[in-house]
Image (cartoon, rainbow, N blue to C red):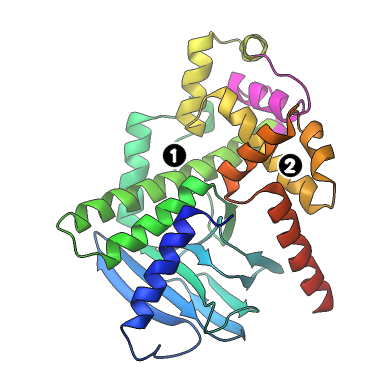
């Protein structure tokens, strides 16, 4: 099933290209919009191409809308880039891009949002003021000084499409909707970075904080029933304190975090070729229908569709 957001984006593409005689160029045809310390570029590619260069002058947040790219960067970085994935480039970073599937009937479309350092600092300051992290983990700040490849949820995918719609629309609240959308996107990016930082801390030293101890326990017991009261004892926190710290850092409570980690692990296992039924039980779900529903909610694809797409990409990579 295709997500609602992708249906909207397909409509945007049809409207944009139907009103014109055709794209100015077939590879990385760029449409630019500017507002609120952010520059949005929508790139549409209508033909197969290889090693197309992209340079980041400011922080550049890229989100795939449709199709597939393959990214090549420093330190032997090579990875497919698909919907439900984000790619963050630090100022001065360069990557090269392949377009293995692009066609005029099904263009590869990507959003690239150039964001000023001052805007990013503003969002960091707001998080530090309103949702400070535990002192041992330091302040909210961008963690990466190089290219960063992230997975994101269906909610973030729909946010990307709403941002595109705000730039394309002519309604009176366009600038307000866009401003809020950019702030939300930056917040999500920083939270994902903070989440991965916390997970690294938990792997390296589970006893660093009560929160890292709880996170480490969750990650090493995903196949088991995890009791919140038990997490409270492990973290040496009251129930209210545990929920508060999870929401400050993860933006979700511990129960939802457990679901998210199980589904992230499920993606890895499905990609490795395991059957969906065995994965369901291995990551702690007892009802395959519930597992499928939660997986689709988080990633916009059913486990079966994800597995088929991954096998298709792996086959093409092996042939290449």
Q: Position of residue 89 (x, y in %)?
A: 50, 63
Residue at which label 2 appears? 266
Q: Is residue 203 left or right of residue 117?
A: right
Q: Position of residue 192 (x, y in %)?
A: 53, 44
Q: Position of residue 18 (x, y in %)?
A: 36, 82
Q: Residue at x 47, y 32 (%)?
A: 251
Note whether 244 is above or below 88 in the view shown.
above
Note whether 167 is above or below 253 in the view shown.
below
C-alpha distance separating marks 2 and 1: 29 Å
Q: Is residue 217 magenta?
A: yes
Residue at which label 1 appears? 140
Q: Residue at x 37, y 69 (%)?
A: 12
- The foreground one among 170 and 114 is 170
Task: Give the quarter of the image for residue 132.
Answer: top left
Q: Is residue 173 left or right of residue 105?
A: left
Callout 1: SS: loop
Image: magenta residue range: 203-227
- The foreground one among 18 and 113 is 18
Badge 2: residue crowd in 10 Å (few <14, some 14–19, many ≥20): many
Q: Are marks 2 and 1 in contact (CB under 8 Å)?
A: no
Q: Is residue 175 magenta?
A: no
Note whether 144 is above or below 256 in the view shown.
below
Callout 2: SS: helix
Upstream in sequence: badge 2 or badge 1: 1
């Amino acid at each position: 099933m295709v997500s609602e957001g992708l249906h909207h984006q397909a409509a945007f593409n049809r409207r944009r290209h139907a009103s014109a005689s055709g794209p100015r160029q077939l590879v990385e045809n760029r449409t630019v919009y500017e507002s609120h310390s952010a520059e949005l570029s929508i790139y549409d590619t209508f033909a197969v191409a290889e090693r197309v260069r992209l340079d980041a002058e400011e922080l550049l947040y890229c989100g795939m809308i449709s199709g597939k790219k393959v990214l090549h960067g420093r330190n032997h970085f090579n990875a497919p880039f698909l919907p439900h994935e984000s790619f963050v480039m630090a100022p001065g970073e360069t990557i090269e891009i392949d377009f293995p599937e692009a066609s005029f009937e099904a263009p590869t479309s990507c959003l690239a949002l150039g964001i000023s350092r001052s805007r990013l600092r503003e969002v960091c300051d707001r998080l530090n003021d309103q949702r400070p992290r535990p002192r041992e983990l330091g302040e909210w700040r961008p963690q990466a000084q190089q290219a960063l490849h992230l997975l994101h949820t269906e909610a973030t995918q729909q946010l990307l499409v709403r941002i595109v719609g705000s730039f394309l629309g002519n309604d009176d609240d366009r600038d307000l909707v866009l401003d809020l959308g950019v702030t939300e996107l930056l917040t999500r990016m920083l939270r994902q970075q903070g989440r991965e930082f916390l997970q690294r801390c938990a792997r390296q030293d589970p006893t660093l904080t009560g929160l890292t101890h709880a996170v480490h326990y969750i990650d090493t017991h995903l196949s088991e029933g995890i009791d919140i009261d038990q997490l409270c004892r492990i973290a040496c926190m009251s129930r209210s304190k545990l929920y508060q710290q999870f929401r400050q850092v993860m933006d979700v409570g511990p129960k939802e975090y457990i679901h998210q980690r199980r589904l992230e692990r499920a993606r890895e296992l499905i990609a490795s070729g395991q059957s969906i039924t065995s994965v369901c039980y291995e990551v702690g779900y007892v009802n395959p229908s519930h597992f499928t529903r939660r997986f689709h909610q988080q990633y916009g694809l059913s486990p079966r569709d994800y597995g088929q797409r991954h096998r298709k990409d792996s086959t093409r990579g092996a042939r290449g």
